[in-house]
Amino acid sequence: MTKLDVNSGACGFCSRISVEKTEQKGKLHLHIETDCEMVKRMATELAVLDSMATAFTHFLNNPVYKAAAMNLKHVACPVPGAIIKALEVEAGFAVPKEITMKFKK
């Protein structure tokens, strides 16, 4: 199982993303713990993801970004990208390397 914690910033919401392989080849189970109602709605649409279709589909057709477009009001929310990063690690397409964003003055 791959777990990734996301602090979304000014909104104050944190999300714990968990992705785990299922018994069905190439399918992954997604679970998100969060107080953000929009992310919760999005997660219900993404309970089971196809690893290839999610990791290698462009933005406009990607199931994660489609669900984000339907459920999230804030387009800069880092959760959709984090879901895909966690999926890539669980599927073996990437290594678990820290991701950061820092504002500079």
Image: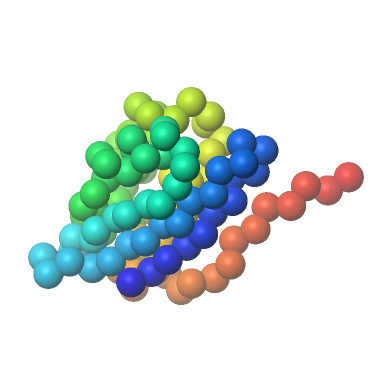
Q: Quadrant of residue 46?
A: top left
Query: Which of the two residues, 68 or 36, is positioned nearer the viewer here?
Result: 36
Up the image or down, 58 lies above or below 87; here it is: above
Horizontal and vertical percent position of residue 91? 30, 68
Q: Where does the N terminus fall, quadrant-wise?
A: bottom left
Q: Residue at x 48, y 51 (%)?
A: 15
Asked if residue 55 can be seen in this view, the reply is yes
Query: Which of the two residues, 16 or 70, is positioned nearer the viewer here?
Result: 16
Q: Quadrant of residue 22?
A: bottom left
Up the image or down, 83 lies above or below 12; here it is: below
Q: Residue at x 48, y 72 (%)?
A: 96
- Number of numbered discs: 0
Horizontal and vertical percent position of residue 38? 42, 33
Horizontal and vertical percent position of residue 10? 67, 38
Q: Residue at x 74, y 52 (%)?
A: 102
Asked if residue 85 can be seen in this view, the reply is no
Indicate left or right for 86 with 28 as reference. Answer: right
